[in-house]
Amino acid sequence: MTPETPGSGSTVRRILLGSQLRRLREQKGVTRQDAGYVIRASESKISRLELGRVSFKERDVDDLLTLYGVADKAERDALIQLAREANTPGWWHRYNDVLPGWFQTYVGLEESAALIRTYELQFVPGLLQSEGYARAVIRLGNAGAAEHEIDQRVELRLQRQERLTGPDAPRLWAVIDEGALRRPIGGPEVMRGQFEHLIEMSKLPNVTIQIMPFRFGGHAAEGGAFTILRFPEQDLPDVVYVENLTGAMYLDKRDDVDTYLQAMERLCVDSATPERTVELLGDFLRET
């Protein structure tokens, strides 16, 4: 299969198909256990399918649609086609040897998002990193890795950034804690390049950058970094991504998402305005 192009979103197609199969199953009153029996799978496999966590076999989708009483040919054909598209490998799959499974999910979701809101406490967000800064950060997190592996990781990060300037670019709203900008990564030259890069990125019509200054004191997101993804498909809820050293959490329950949305909105109100942020970046540049 030909890998999908950036922004085409097989991850989201899997989630959409899974949610539609779950709706059909529940409408018919079929248990996950019974559904699993029909496709020779476990109840937990049905759960993973309905959450869009695993790929679909077209034969399994066909059998499930029969079990759920979907007789309309047009509806069946549309869902089978969705399964076919959902199995298209993402462009990032060629980085499988350096990309942990839990982050593959994030890259797939990021590719499909229409709006990305992020708060970073320690580093400049990956989508806004200059090549030199990205290389320095990746070296810090992968001590002892071979140079070709570092190159791959940097290449992946830069390719993720291409969506910001491509067709159907998402809206990116980033709040960066001043600590992330004061922390010297890679030396003065790298930091100067990063400040210049942020100033250039802030000129894009779909990118908004704000700095949360030290002088503000405590604020709404002292708990740590997070990202909120919103998708153009109305059937999909917002997803909150929270990363740790060995994995990540993906939150889509309404109460959880609302808590993070409120924190993000508070951060945007309390941080330096986008205009003032560019001035601050200019100050940091001159000080470096």
Image (cartoon, rainbow, N blue to C red):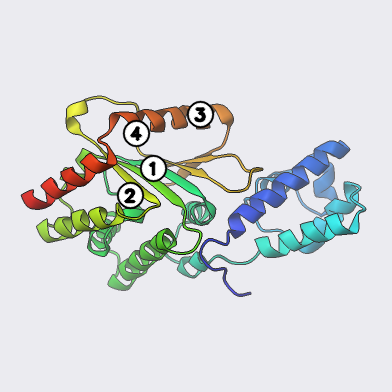
Tag 4 or tag 3, which sits nearer the N-term? 3
**Mark 2 or 1, nearer chain start:** 1
Residue underneath mark 3? 258
In the rendered image, which residue does mark 4 sit on? 268
Q: Nearer the viewer, residue 137 or 97?
A: 137
- Disc 1/disc 4 C-alpha distance (Å): 11 Å
Residue 77: which quarter of the image?
bottom right
Q: Amino acid at mark 2?
A: Pro
Distance (Cα) linking label 2 and label 4? 16 Å
Establish if 23 lies above or below 112: above
- Residue at image mark 2: 125
Residue 46: x %, y % from top left: 73, 47
Instruction: Classify 10 Å Cα crowding around label 2: few (below 14), some (14-19), many (20 and above).
Output: some
- The span from disc 2 to disc 1 (Cα, nearest Å) is 8 Å
Contact check, label 2 and label 1, Cβ < 8 Å: yes
First-in-chain label (2 vs 4): 2
C-alpha gap between disc 3 and disc 4: 15 Å
Q: Which amino acid type corresponds to the residue marked 3 in the rendered image?
A: Asp
Q: Residues within 10 Å of mark 1 (few under 14, many from 20)?
A: many
The residue tagged 1 is 118
Question: As displayed, is residue 6 above or below residue 26?
Answer: below
Label 1: element kind: strand
Dot 1 or dot 4, earlier in sequence: 1
Q: Secondary structure at mark 2?
A: loop
